[in-house]
Image: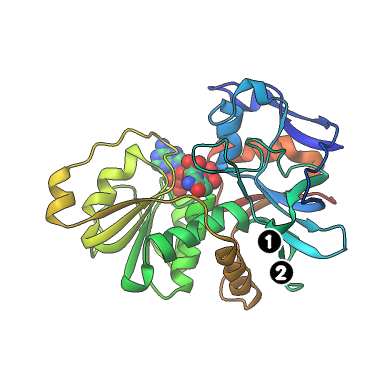
Amino acid sequence: MRAAYASALHPDQPLRGLTVGDLPASPAPDGWVTVEVRASSLNHHDLWSLRGVGLPPDRLPMILGCDAAGVDPDGNEVVVYPVVEDRADPRGFSLFSERHPGTIAERLAAPRENLIPKPAGVSFADAACLPTAWLTAYHMLVTRGRIAEAESVLVQGAGGGVATAAVALGVALGKRVYATSREQGKRERIAELGATAVEPGARLPERVGVVIESVGAPTFDHSMKCAAPGARIVVCGATAGHRAEIDLRRVFAMQLEILGSSMGTPDELAALLRMIEEGTVRPVIDTTFGFGEVERAFERLASGDVFGKVVIDHLA
Ligand SMILES: NC(=O)c1ccc[n+]([C@@H]2O[C@H](COP(=O)([O-])OP(=O)(O)OC[C@H]3O[C@@H](n4cnc5c(N)ncnc54)[C@H](OP(=O)(O)O)[C@@H]3O)[C@@H](O)[C@H]2O)c1
Protein backbone atom coordinates (compact mmCIF):
# COMPACT_ATOMS: atom_id res chain seq x y z
CA MET A 1 0.00 0.00 0.00
CA ARG A 2 1.06 3.61 -0.64
CA ALA A 3 2.72 5.18 2.41
CA ALA A 4 5.15 7.89 3.57
CA TYR A 5 7.75 6.33 5.81
CA ALA A 6 11.07 6.82 7.53
CA SER A 7 13.60 4.63 5.68
CA ALA A 8 16.66 6.15 7.40
CA LEU A 9 17.36 8.52 10.30
CA HIS A 10 19.32 11.77 9.87
CA PRO A 11 19.61 13.95 13.00
CA ASP A 12 20.56 17.09 11.02
CA GLN A 13 18.80 16.56 7.68
CA PRO A 14 15.58 14.76 8.58
CA LEU A 15 14.01 14.90 5.10
CA ARG A 16 16.82 12.73 3.66
CA GLY A 17 15.26 9.68 5.33
CA LEU A 18 11.70 10.29 4.06
CA THR A 19 10.51 7.81 1.43
CA VAL A 20 7.13 7.71 -0.33
CA GLY A 21 6.36 4.34 -1.88
CA ASP A 22 4.73 0.96 -1.41
CA LEU A 23 4.96 -0.96 1.86
CA PRO A 24 3.03 -4.09 2.83
CA ALA A 25 0.24 -3.36 5.32
CA SER A 26 0.96 -4.93 8.73
CA PRO A 27 -1.70 -7.36 9.95
CA ALA A 28 -4.08 -5.76 12.48
CA PRO A 29 -3.65 -7.23 16.01
CA ASP A 30 -6.70 -8.73 17.76
CA GLY A 31 -9.24 -6.07 18.63
CA TRP A 32 -7.85 -3.68 16.01
CA VAL A 33 -9.61 -2.64 12.82
CA THR A 34 -8.43 -1.18 9.53
CA VAL A 35 -9.39 2.41 8.67
CA GLU A 36 -9.31 3.74 5.09
CA VAL A 37 -7.50 7.03 5.67
CA ARG A 38 -9.11 10.05 3.94
CA ALA A 39 -6.96 12.79 5.49
CA SER A 40 -3.92 12.95 7.75
CA SER A 41 -1.90 15.85 9.10
CA LEU A 42 1.77 16.38 9.85
CA ASN A 43 3.23 17.25 13.24
CA HIS A 44 6.66 18.28 14.41
CA HIS A 45 6.69 14.75 15.84
CA ASP A 46 7.21 13.43 12.28
CA LEU A 47 10.39 15.51 11.97
CA TRP A 48 11.62 14.29 15.36
CA SER A 49 11.03 10.70 14.15
CA LEU A 50 13.06 11.35 10.97
CA ARG A 51 15.83 12.77 13.18
CA GLY A 52 15.80 9.53 15.21
CA VAL A 53 14.28 11.10 18.34
CA GLY A 54 11.97 8.46 19.81
CA LEU A 55 12.44 6.20 16.78
CA PRO A 56 15.42 3.80 16.94
CA PRO A 57 16.87 2.35 13.69
CA ASP A 58 15.64 -1.17 14.46
CA ARG A 59 12.03 -0.01 13.96
CA LEU A 60 12.63 1.09 10.34
CA PRO A 61 10.95 1.27 7.93
CA MET A 62 8.26 3.09 9.95
CA ILE A 63 5.19 4.72 8.40
CA LEU A 64 5.00 8.31 9.67
CA GLY A 65 2.02 10.28 10.96
CA CYS A 66 0.04 10.39 14.20
CA ASP A 67 -3.20 11.91 12.94
CA ALA A 68 -5.93 10.46 10.74
CA ALA A 69 -9.58 10.73 9.84
CA GLY A 70 -11.17 8.12 7.62
CA VAL A 71 -13.77 5.40 7.18
CA ASP A 72 -14.01 2.26 9.34
CA PRO A 73 -14.87 -1.24 8.00
CA ASP A 74 -18.60 -0.60 8.64
CA GLY A 75 -18.55 2.57 6.53
CA ASN A 76 -18.62 4.98 9.51
CA GLU A 77 -16.67 8.23 9.29
CA VAL A 78 -14.22 8.37 12.18
CA VAL A 79 -11.37 10.31 13.74
CA VAL A 80 -8.63 8.14 15.19
CA TYR A 81 -7.50 8.85 18.76
CA PRO A 82 -3.70 8.64 18.42
CA VAL A 83 -2.66 7.27 21.84
CA VAL A 84 -2.18 3.50 22.09
CA GLU A 85 -1.69 1.78 25.43
CA ASP A 86 1.82 0.36 25.47
CA ARG A 87 3.41 -1.41 28.45
CA ALA A 88 6.79 -1.55 26.70
CA ASP A 89 7.00 2.25 26.66
CA PRO A 90 8.07 4.10 29.86
CA ARG A 91 5.16 6.55 29.34
CA GLY A 92 2.71 3.63 29.31
CA PHE A 93 1.58 4.60 25.80
CA SER A 94 2.86 5.22 22.33
CA LEU A 95 1.59 7.21 19.36
CA PHE A 96 1.08 5.85 15.86
CA SER A 97 4.43 5.90 14.02
CA GLU A 98 6.41 5.16 17.22
CA ARG A 99 5.82 1.40 17.65
CA HIS A 100 2.81 0.85 15.38
CA PRO A 101 2.66 2.01 11.73
CA GLY A 102 1.54 5.61 11.31
CA THR A 103 -1.29 7.38 9.54
CA ILE A 104 0.24 8.70 6.30
CA ALA A 105 -0.79 5.64 4.34
CA GLU A 106 -3.79 4.31 2.45
CA ARG A 107 -4.86 2.29 5.46
CA LEU A 108 -4.26 2.41 9.22
CA ALA A 109 -4.66 -0.37 11.77
CA ALA A 110 -6.01 1.02 15.06
CA PRO A 111 -7.61 -0.33 18.24
CA ARG A 112 -11.40 -0.31 17.78
CA GLU A 113 -11.82 1.77 20.96
CA ASN A 114 -9.64 4.52 19.42
CA LEU A 115 -12.25 5.28 16.73
CA ILE A 116 -14.33 8.36 17.52
CA PRO A 117 -17.36 9.21 15.33
CA LYS A 118 -16.71 12.16 13.04
CA PRO A 119 -19.72 14.49 12.83
CA ALA A 120 -20.94 14.79 9.23
CA GLY A 121 -20.53 18.57 9.37
CA VAL A 122 -16.80 18.36 10.12
CA SER A 123 -14.61 17.78 7.04
CA PHE A 124 -12.00 15.02 6.95
CA ALA A 125 -9.30 17.70 6.63
CA ASP A 126 -10.49 19.62 9.71
CA ALA A 127 -10.90 16.36 11.67
CA ALA A 128 -7.37 15.25 10.77
CA CYS A 129 -5.95 18.37 12.46
CA LEU A 130 -7.30 17.43 15.86
CA PRO A 131 -5.80 14.20 17.25
CA THR A 132 -2.34 15.50 18.19
CA ALA A 133 -1.86 19.28 17.95
CA TRP A 134 -5.39 20.42 18.78
CA LEU A 135 -5.91 17.78 21.45
CA THR A 136 -2.61 18.73 23.06
CA ALA A 137 -3.52 22.43 23.03
CA TYR A 138 -6.96 21.69 24.53
CA HIS A 139 -5.47 19.50 27.30
CA MET A 140 -2.81 22.15 28.04
CA LEU A 141 -5.32 24.98 28.30
CA VAL A 142 -8.36 23.36 29.86
CA THR A 143 -7.08 20.48 31.98
CA ARG A 144 -3.46 21.19 32.92
CA GLY A 145 -3.61 25.00 32.73
CA ARG A 146 -7.08 25.33 34.35
CA ILE A 147 -7.86 28.16 31.95
CA ALA A 148 -11.30 28.59 33.54
CA GLU A 149 -9.50 30.19 36.54
CA ALA A 150 -7.55 32.63 34.33
CA GLU A 151 -8.39 35.82 32.46
CA SER A 152 -5.51 35.74 30.02
CA VAL A 153 -3.02 33.40 28.35
CA LEU A 154 0.33 33.70 26.56
CA VAL A 155 1.18 31.33 23.69
CA GLN A 156 4.84 31.16 22.65
CA GLY A 157 5.98 30.57 19.03
CA ALA A 158 2.46 30.97 17.81
CA GLY A 159 2.86 29.88 14.17
CA GLY A 160 3.00 26.13 14.81
CA GLY A 161 0.27 23.51 14.92
CA VAL A 162 -0.09 23.29 18.71
CA ALA A 163 0.35 27.03 19.15
CA THR A 164 -2.21 28.19 16.56
CA ALA A 165 -4.64 25.73 18.12
CA ALA A 166 -3.95 27.21 21.58
CA VAL A 167 -4.50 30.74 20.25
CA ALA A 168 -7.77 29.86 18.51
CA LEU A 169 -9.06 27.84 21.49
CA GLY A 170 -8.04 30.51 24.00
CA VAL A 171 -9.99 33.12 22.03
CA ALA A 172 -12.97 30.74 21.65
CA LEU A 173 -12.96 30.17 25.43
CA GLY A 174 -13.30 33.92 25.95
CA LYS A 175 -9.79 34.69 27.26
CA ARG A 176 -7.44 37.54 26.42
CA VAL A 177 -4.75 35.82 24.34
CA TYR A 178 -1.23 37.13 23.76
CA ALA A 179 1.05 35.30 21.36
CA THR A 180 4.66 35.67 20.28
CA SER A 181 6.01 34.88 16.84
CA ARG A 182 9.36 35.58 15.23
CA GLU A 183 7.75 36.71 11.99
CA GLN A 184 5.76 39.84 11.24
CA GLY A 185 3.54 37.99 8.73
CA LYS A 186 2.58 35.39 11.35
CA ARG A 187 1.94 38.12 13.92
CA GLU A 188 -0.56 39.69 11.52
CA ARG A 189 -2.34 36.35 11.13
CA ILE A 190 -2.40 35.83 14.90
CA ALA A 191 -4.17 39.18 15.20
CA GLU A 192 -6.76 37.97 12.66
CA LEU A 193 -7.51 35.08 15.05
CA GLY A 194 -8.42 37.62 17.73
CA ALA A 195 -5.20 37.56 19.78
CA THR A 196 -2.65 40.27 20.56
CA ALA A 197 0.55 39.41 18.70
CA VAL A 198 3.94 40.56 20.01
CA GLU A 199 7.59 40.02 19.18
CA PRO A 200 9.40 37.27 21.14
CA GLY A 201 10.47 38.64 24.53
CA ALA A 202 8.19 41.72 24.40
CA ARG A 203 6.69 43.10 27.61
CA LEU A 204 2.96 42.31 27.87
CA PRO A 205 0.39 44.83 29.18
CA GLU A 206 -0.48 42.38 31.98
CA ARG A 207 0.81 39.20 33.60
CA VAL A 208 -1.09 36.09 32.45
CA GLY A 209 -2.62 33.15 34.32
CA VAL A 210 -1.55 30.47 31.82
CA VAL A 211 1.47 30.20 29.52
CA ILE A 212 1.54 27.67 26.67
CA GLU A 213 5.15 26.59 26.03
CA SER A 214 6.27 24.41 23.14
CA VAL A 215 9.35 26.38 21.99
CA GLY A 216 11.60 25.78 25.01
CA ALA A 217 14.99 27.33 25.72
CA PRO A 218 14.68 30.57 23.67
CA THR A 219 11.32 31.57 25.19
CA PHE A 220 11.22 29.99 28.66
CA ASP A 221 12.64 32.95 30.59
CA HIS A 222 10.06 35.23 28.95
CA SER A 223 7.33 32.74 29.85
CA MET A 224 8.39 32.92 33.52
CA LYS A 225 8.52 36.73 33.51
CA CYS A 226 5.01 37.02 32.00
CA ALA A 227 3.42 34.71 34.59
CA ALA A 228 1.07 36.23 37.19
CA PRO A 229 1.21 35.03 40.81
CA GLY A 230 -0.02 31.41 40.92
CA ALA A 231 0.14 31.05 37.11
CA ARG A 232 0.53 27.75 35.31
CA ILE A 233 3.35 27.42 32.76
CA VAL A 234 2.34 24.38 30.74
CA VAL A 235 5.06 22.68 28.68
CA CYS A 236 4.40 20.15 25.91
CA GLY A 237 7.57 20.43 23.88
CA ALA A 238 10.92 22.08 23.35
CA THR A 239 11.19 22.61 19.58
CA ALA A 240 14.14 24.99 19.84
CA GLY A 241 16.07 23.54 22.80
CA HIS A 242 15.28 21.57 25.96
CA ARG A 243 17.81 23.08 28.39
CA ALA A 244 16.21 26.24 29.72
CA GLU A 245 17.58 28.33 32.59
CA ILE A 246 15.07 28.90 35.40
CA ASP A 247 15.27 31.55 38.12
CA LEU A 248 13.96 29.51 41.04
CA ARG A 249 13.36 32.67 43.08
CA ARG A 250 10.56 33.54 40.67
CA VAL A 251 9.04 30.05 41.02
CA PHE A 252 8.63 30.28 44.78
CA ALA A 253 8.04 34.02 45.16
CA MET A 254 5.27 34.02 42.53
CA GLN A 255 4.05 30.52 43.52
CA LEU A 256 4.24 29.38 39.89
CA GLU A 257 3.30 25.94 38.66
CA ILE A 258 5.44 24.47 35.88
CA LEU A 259 3.45 21.59 34.43
CA GLY A 260 4.29 18.98 31.82
CA SER A 261 1.58 17.99 29.39
CA SER A 262 1.26 15.13 26.91
CA MET A 263 -1.58 14.61 24.44
CA GLY A 264 -5.12 14.37 25.94
CA THR A 265 -8.03 11.98 26.48
CA PRO A 266 -10.61 10.51 24.07
CA ASP A 267 -13.30 12.55 25.86
CA GLU A 268 -11.31 15.73 25.21
CA LEU A 269 -11.03 14.80 21.52
CA ALA A 270 -14.80 14.28 21.39
CA ALA A 271 -15.32 17.67 23.11
CA LEU A 272 -13.10 19.31 20.49
CA LEU A 273 -15.09 17.69 17.68
CA ARG A 274 -18.29 19.11 19.22
CA MET A 275 -16.76 22.61 19.37
CA ILE A 276 -15.89 22.38 15.68
CA GLU A 277 -19.28 20.95 14.72
CA GLU A 278 -20.98 23.83 16.58
CA GLY A 279 -18.75 26.34 14.79
CA THR A 280 -17.22 27.68 18.04
CA VAL A 281 -13.76 27.34 16.53
CA ARG A 282 -12.22 26.16 13.25
CA PRO A 283 -8.84 24.40 12.77
CA VAL A 284 -6.19 26.67 11.30
CA ILE A 285 -4.85 24.96 8.16
CA ASP A 286 -1.65 26.27 6.63
CA THR A 287 -1.75 24.16 3.44
CA THR A 288 -3.47 21.03 2.15
CA PHE A 289 -1.38 18.80 -0.11
CA GLY A 290 -2.45 15.77 -2.17
CA PHE A 291 -0.88 12.41 -1.29
CA GLY A 292 1.37 12.73 -4.35
CA GLU A 293 2.88 15.88 -2.82
CA VAL A 294 3.82 14.42 0.58
CA GLU A 295 7.49 15.40 0.17
CA ARG A 296 6.47 19.02 -0.43
CA ALA A 297 4.27 18.87 2.64
CA PHE A 298 7.23 17.76 4.76
CA GLU A 299 9.44 20.48 3.24
CA ARG A 300 6.79 23.03 4.18
CA LEU A 301 6.69 21.80 7.80
CA ALA A 302 10.48 21.66 8.06
CA SER A 303 10.83 25.21 6.70
CA GLY A 304 9.32 26.59 9.94
CA ASP A 305 7.21 28.97 7.83
CA VAL A 306 3.92 27.26 8.66
CA PHE A 307 0.95 29.00 10.17
CA GLY A 308 -1.27 26.20 11.43
CA LYS A 309 -1.52 22.62 10.25
CA VAL A 310 -0.16 20.92 7.15
CA VAL A 311 -2.83 18.48 5.91
CA ILE A 312 -2.60 15.56 3.45
CA ASP A 313 -5.71 14.82 1.38
CA HIS A 314 -5.43 11.08 0.72
CA LEU A 315 -7.95 11.12 -2.15
CA ALA A 316 -6.32 13.98 -4.11
N1 LIG B 1 3.78 16.49 24.54
C1 LIG B 1 2.90 16.35 23.58
O1 LIG B 1 1.90 15.66 23.74
C2 LIG B 1 3.10 17.09 22.28
C3 LIG B 1 2.09 17.11 21.34
C4 LIG B 1 2.25 17.85 20.17
C5 LIG B 1 3.45 18.54 19.97
N2 LIG B 1 4.44 18.48 20.90
C6 LIG B 1 5.69 19.22 20.70
O2 LIG B 1 5.37 20.59 20.61
C7 LIG B 1 6.25 21.24 19.69
C8 LIG B 1 5.42 21.96 18.63
O3 LIG B 1 4.82 20.99 17.80
P1 LIG B 1 4.06 21.43 16.46
O4 LIG B 1 3.67 20.18 15.75
O5 LIG B 1 3.05 22.47 16.78
O6 LIG B 1 5.30 22.11 15.67
P2 LIG B 1 5.33 23.08 14.41
O7 LIG B 1 3.99 23.12 13.76
O8 LIG B 1 6.51 22.69 13.60
O9 LIG B 1 5.61 24.53 15.09
C9 LIG B 1 6.79 24.90 15.73
C10 LIG B 1 6.71 26.40 16.11
O10 LIG B 1 7.73 26.68 17.10
C11 LIG B 1 8.25 27.97 16.92
N3 LIG B 1 9.72 27.92 16.84
C12 LIG B 1 10.47 27.04 16.17
N4 LIG B 1 11.79 27.31 16.36
C13 LIG B 1 11.86 28.39 17.15
C14 LIG B 1 12.92 29.15 17.66
N5 LIG B 1 14.20 28.87 17.40
N6 LIG B 1 12.61 30.20 18.41
C15 LIG B 1 11.32 30.51 18.66
N7 LIG B 1 10.27 29.80 18.19
C16 LIG B 1 10.53 28.75 17.44
C17 LIG B 1 7.72 28.52 15.62
O11 LIG B 1 6.86 29.60 15.89
P3 LIG B 1 7.06 31.04 15.18
O12 LIG B 1 7.64 30.79 13.82
O13 LIG B 1 5.69 31.59 15.17
O14 LIG B 1 7.98 31.84 16.04
C18 LIG B 1 7.01 27.33 14.96
O15 LIG B 1 5.88 27.75 14.28
C19 LIG B 1 7.17 20.15 19.13
O16 LIG B 1 8.40 20.19 19.83
C20 LIG B 1 6.41 18.87 19.40
O17 LIG B 1 7.28 17.76 19.53
C21 LIG B 1 4.28 17.77 22.05
Q: Quadrant of the N terminus?
A: top right
Q: Residue 294: name its quadrant.
A: top right
Mark 1 is surrounded, within 10 Å at the Cα level, by few (under 14), some (14 to 19) or many (20 or more) other residues, namely: many
Q: Is residue 294 left or right of residue 36?
A: left
Q: What x and y, as percent, mark residue 188?
A: 46, 58
Q: Nearer the viewer, residue 285 or 8?
A: 8
Q: Which residue is mark 2?
A: 122
- Relative to 55, residue 81 above or below: below
Is the CB atom of the residue marked by disc 2 within 8 angstroms of ligand 1's nearest atom? no
Q: Nearer the viewer, residue 310 or 205?
A: 310
Q: Earlier in the sequence, mark 1 or mark 2?
A: 2
Q: Which residue is mark 1?
A: 127
Label for residue 83?
none
Secondary structure under tag 1 reads: helix
Secondary structure under tag 2 reads: loop
Q: What x and y, as percent, mark residue 238?
A: 41, 39
Q: Is residue 168 left or right of residue 310?
A: left
Q: How many marks?
A: 2
Residue shown at 37% from the left, 34% from the top: 242
**One can see residue 189 in this view:** no
Residue shown at 42% from the left, 46% from the top: 214
Q: Is residue 153 left or right of residue 222?
A: right
**One can see residue 216 in this view:** yes
Q: Residue 173: name its quadrant.
A: bottom left
Q: What x and y, as percent, mark residue 151?
A: 31, 72
Calculate the distance from the C-alpha at mark 1 to the C-alpha at mark 2: 6 Å
- Mark 1 and mark 2 residues within 8 Å of each other at the beta carbon: yes
- Relative to 120, residue 145 above or below: above
Amino acid tagged 1: Ala
Mark 2 is surrounded, within 10 Å at the Cα level, by few (under 14), some (14 to 19) or many (20 or more) other residues, namely: some
Q: Residue furthest bottom?
A: 278
